[in-house]
Amino acid sequence: MGLDATGAGAGPVTVRRGVPAGSERRAAELYWDAFGRKLGPALNPPDKAVSFLTAHLNADRAVCALLDGQLVGLAGYQLGGRSLTGGSAFDVLRAYGRLRGLHRLLLLALFERRPAPGQLVMDGIAVAPGVRGRGVGSLLIEEVATVAAEEGRREIRLDVIDTNPRARALYERRGFTAVRTEHTPYLRGLLGFGAVTAMRRPVEANETRGPRTP
């Protein structure tokens, strides 16, 4: 699609499948930077949250952007019942304690999304501040589209909250359309957003091209 993530004074951004070995904590930090405001009530304090995400990351459920060998962006997806951010109910209770953990499990359940037949559910995009505006998010979306095509999925589905218009604008530019908005004003005080919009993008068979690795 003519994407270009090369910027002046820096090398090209390359995209690969999976979180590189040794970059798990960096991936968790990027994810938390992007979604910590939403996940904070369930996983705070931040240091503990990042450690939890690192320990239970499914590294093979992401496409990643690298600049000079350093992880600068990632997009997660669900496949085979596993998503980028893992961890069972037992893991949450063990990390946060039984009483506090039960409350956190209820909050985490609000974010669960199961794919319909033929769907690949995308788990958001996280891009380092220093490379935003260079097309990294678009590169990641197109690699997820390739994964979806290779897996025989008909469409990609994702959810975007009402306090993230920049992300929604990116998704719309990359072919996603809004199909349903769930208004949750009762969550605004707790989670910081009051509506979630489901967006979908059809998957074309000719999007299959295999992973691009550094």
Image (cartoon, rainbow, N blue to C red):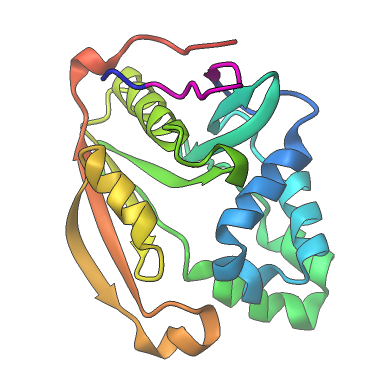
Residue 191 horizontal/vertical position (percent):
52, 79
Q: Residue at x 64, y 77 (%)?
A: 41
Q: Residue at x 38, y 53 (%)?
A: 167
Q: Hey, which quadrant is residue 33 in on the image?
A: bottom right
Above or below residue 138? Residue 31 is below
6 part of magenta stretch: yes
Above or below residue 173? Residue 96 is below
Give the main secondary structure of the magenta stretch. loop
Residue 96 horizontal/vertical position (percent):
81, 71
Above or below residue 20? Residue 132 is below
Q: Residue at x 54, y 33 (%)?
A: 62
Q: Hey, which quadrant is residue 165 in on the image?
A: bottom left
Q: Quadrant of the C terminus?
A: top right
Residue 170 horizontal/vertical position (percent):
32, 46
The region drawn magenta spans 4-14
In this view, which residue lies farthest toward the front?
Answer: 8
Above or below residue 110? Residue 20 is above
Q: Hey, which quadrant is residue 17 in on the image?
A: top right
200 part of magenta stretch: no
Residue 22 horizontal/vertical position (percent):
80, 28
Q: Quadrant of the N terminus?
A: top left
Between 82 and 40, the residue placed more toward the observer is: 40
